[in-house]
Amino acid sequence: MCIGIPMQVTAVEPGHAWCEGRGERRRITTALVGEVAPGDWLLVFLGDARECIDATRAHEVDSALDLVLGAMQGLDVAGGAGFSLPSQMTADQLSVLAGQS
């Protein structure tokens, strides 16, 4: 599985951008998204920017990744809000999640 990481552009080079996100700094290929500028947000998969996103979407993706990481570590990440991984759901819950109910 490949997970997209939101990263913010800090510097630009031809065909690449230096980006920071989730505690790391990386050189990202920008060929698939075109020109970017410092301050832009990118959704990065395996070192390649696949999509330009806004700060709100970057925050949403980061929050979802935090929930998944916490759940994988066995933490009560949702504070009782009902978040659980699909592997922990009943067949009925999965059906609702998939929009089949």
Image (tube, rainbow, N blue to C red):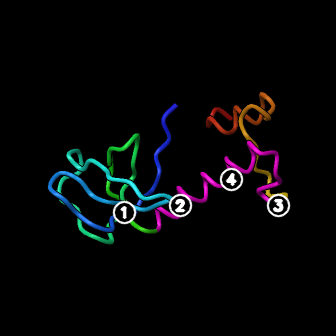
Amino acid on which disc 4 is placed: Leu
Quick one: label 2, few (<14), some, or many (20+) residues within 10 Å?
few
- Vertical placement of residue 23 versus 71, above or below: below
Locate residue 62 relative to residue 31 in the image: left or right: right
> In the rendering, at what x and y percent does residue 14 appear?
14, 55
Q: Residue at x 62, y 37 (%)?
A: 99
* Label 4: which secondary element: helix
Label 4: few (<14), some (14–19) or many (≥20) C-alpha neighbours in 10 Å: some
Mark 2 or mark 1, which is nearer to you?
Answer: 2
Mark 2 and mark 1 lie on one chain; the one further toward the N terminus is 2
Q: Which residue is the site of mark 3?
A: 79
Of mark 1 and mark 4, the one earlier in the sequence is 1
Q: Point out the image quarter for the C terminus.
A: top right
Query: For this rendering, which residue is in front, 7 or 14?
Result: 14
Q: Which residue is mark 2?
A: 23
Measure how far apart labels 1 and 4 are at the Cα level.
21 Å
| Left/right of residue 92 with respect to residue 49 in the rendered view | right
Question: Mark 3 or 2 closer to N-term?
Answer: 2
Name the residue carrying label 1. Answer: 41
Question: Sequence-wise, which precedes: disc 2 or disc 4?
Answer: 2
